[in-house]
Amino acid sequence: MNDKHEGKNLSIDNFSKNKNCWIIDSRAKYHVSCSLENFLFYDTIVPIIVKLPNGNHVNATHKGTIKIVGKMFLQDILYIPNFSYNLISISKLAFSYNLKLIIFSKSYTI
């Protein structure tokens, strides 16, 4: 897979208004979706407590699979009700697909 994205001036608020945008997060432990509409399929789970960067704790209530692009699917995505963002965990992505992510000042390559 080879994906190149040129950097743009985007505020985090723009991401929270679009439930289809995904943030690639280097500190995220889990992939997280803020909308059940993003899932191809999902199951209700015993709630998993997820610690947010601000120190708050929230419950993930569902887990499932999402199609990102082409034949790329992310599994074990957690759904957190009332969360504002979709996050892709870099470490989980790299491990799942044996990928290397190279980050430059204005772009990235996977």
Image (spheres, grey):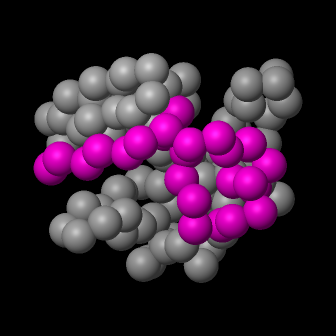
Residue located 15% across and 50% down the image: 1
Residue 99 located left or right of residue 20: left
Position of residue 9 in the picture relative to residue 97 (left or right)? right
Query: Which quadrant would the C terminus be assigned to in this image?
Result: top left
Foreground residue among 57 and 15: 15
The answer to whether one can see residue 24 in this image is: yes
Q: Nearer the viewer, residue 3 or 91?
A: 3
Mark count: 0
49 in magenta = no
- The magenta segment is 1-25
Residue 45 versus residue 47 in the image, above or below: below
Residue visible at 58% across and 67% down in the picture = 20
Residue under the point 60% across and 53% down = 86
Residue 60 at what x, y percent from top left? 67, 52
Residue 95 appears anywhere in the view = no
The image quadrant that residue 8 belongs to is: top right
Q: Position of residue 89 (x, y in %)?
A: 45, 37
Q: Is residue 97 above or below residue 71?
A: above
How far from the left and from the top, in percent, is residue 7?
A: 49, 38
Image location of residue 5, percent across then percent down: 38, 45
